[in-house]
């Protein structure tokens, strides 16, 4: 079993073999082992600051630094002049700064705990087959080979190769820019060079199920999708740049050079921008 990114070009039977799965889904033990091996189906989180680091951060404000400097000067002058009674002023400033730091630390930790509690309350849930039974799991616990059930209104929790589809349509506007929901068909076996937007047997993470229901098998880990996201961003930036030049300059020669010459921006899923996406022709201003 290994991660497979070209399942859209394989039959459903091949998908089961490639991913070491079956119609009844993975067993609980298989899912636990794969979760341990590949990690959770989510973006890696930034390491949390330690309590000590959070406390020290309370002294980084410019006003606090000024007060600390003032306290240090006050104490130093009192010691040099041997006016130990004047040490009180410096220690009062230090006490105020310390109390402020403690209050800030407590408030920040409470805020962090509240955010963590909200995250746990709003974690998305997915329906999957485990040992032949439909169970609900947190979407971050999906693993390679899991069979996910989707229906109208669901947000797709992970990229999946469809193994069943009934009147299934997905809104992929956030991915492809198309405003009309895309029809999906699990029986289709695409060509390996099929562009992203035309893979009828695939559903993509973050898209919304507009109609029907179906089942899909998870082919790869969530982190592998990040490379695709970077490529998609590159594509839209390039398209925007080319269109701006073509429309506002009205120079067809510039437009021709941009679209005709080799531009090394290619989708991670083998989707060549110039081949599979159209850039609007230049618009004559004043027409």
Image (tube, grey):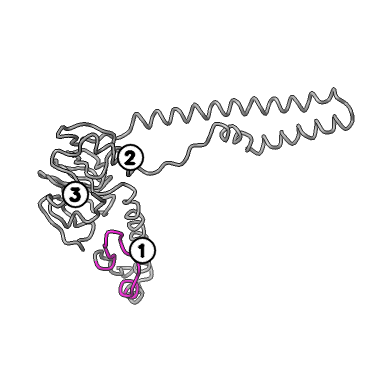
Residue under circle 2?
A: 36
Image position of 280 with respect to 87: above or below: below
Count neighbours of disc 3 (C-alpha within 10 A) and say few if under 14, some if 14 to 19, many if 20 or more. Answer: many
Q: Earlier in the sequence, mark 1 or mark 2?
A: 2
Q: CA distance from mark 3 to mark 2?
A: 23 Å
Asked which secondary structure carries label 1, the reply is: helix
Comes first in the chain, label 3 or label 1: 3
Chain part drawn in magenta: 256-275
Element marked by disc 2: helix
- Asked if disc 1 and disc 2 are in contact, CB closer than 8 Å, the reply is no
**Label 3: element kind:** strand
Mark 3 or 2, closer to the camera: 2
Apparent side of residue 98 relative to residue 145 in the rendered image (left or right): right
Q: Can you tell which of label 1 and label 2 is closer to the viewer?
A: 2
Of badges 3 and 1, nearer the viewer stands 3
Name the residue that disc number 3 marks: 161
**Who is closer to the viewer here, 269 or 179?**
269
**Residue hosting label 1:** 238
For label 2, the crowd category at 10 Å Cα-Cα, with few meaning under 14, some 14 to 19 and many 20 or more, is few
- Point out residue 94 in the picture as x, y percentages from the top left corner: 71, 28
Disc 3 and disc 1 in contact, CB within 8 angstroms: no
- Residue at the spot x=10%, y=43% of the render? 166
Looking at the image, residue 173 lies above or below residue 91: below
């Amino acid at each position: 079993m290994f991660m497979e990114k070209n399942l859209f070009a394989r039959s459903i039977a091949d998908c089961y073999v490639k991913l070491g799965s079956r119609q009844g889904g993975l067993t609980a033990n298989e899912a636990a082992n794969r979760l341990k091996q590949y990690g959770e189906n989510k973006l890696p989180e930034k390491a949390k600051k330690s309590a000590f680091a959070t406390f020290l951060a309370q002294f980084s404000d410019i006003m606090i630094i000024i007060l600390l400097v003032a306290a240090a000067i006050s104490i130093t002058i009192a010691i040099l002049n041997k006016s130990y009674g004047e040490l009180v002023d410096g220690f009062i400033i230090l006490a105020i700064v310390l109390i402020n730091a403690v209050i800030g630390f407590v408030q920040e930790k409470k805020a962090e705990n509240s955010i963590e509690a909200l995250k746990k309350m709003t974690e998305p849930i997915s329906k999957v087959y485990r040992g032949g039974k439909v169970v609900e799991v947190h979407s971050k616990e999906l693993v390679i080979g899991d069979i996910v059930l989707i229906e109208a209104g669901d947000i797709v929790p992970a990229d999946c190769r469809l193994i069943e589809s009934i009147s299934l349509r997905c809104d992929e506007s956030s991915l492809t820019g198309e405003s009309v929901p895309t029809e999906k068909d699990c029986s289709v076996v695409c060509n390996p060079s099929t562009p992203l937007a035309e893979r009828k047997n695939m559903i993509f993470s973050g898209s919304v199920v507009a109609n029907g229901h179906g089942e899909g098998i998870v082919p790869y880990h969530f982190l592998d999708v990040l490379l695709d996201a970077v490529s998609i961003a590159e594509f839209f930036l390039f398209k925007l740049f080319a269109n701006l030049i073509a429309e506002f300059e009205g120079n067809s020669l510039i437009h021709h050079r941009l679209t005709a010459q080799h531009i090394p921006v290619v989708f991670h899923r083998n989707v060549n921008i110039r081949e599979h996406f159209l850039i609007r022709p230049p618009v004559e201003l004043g027409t």
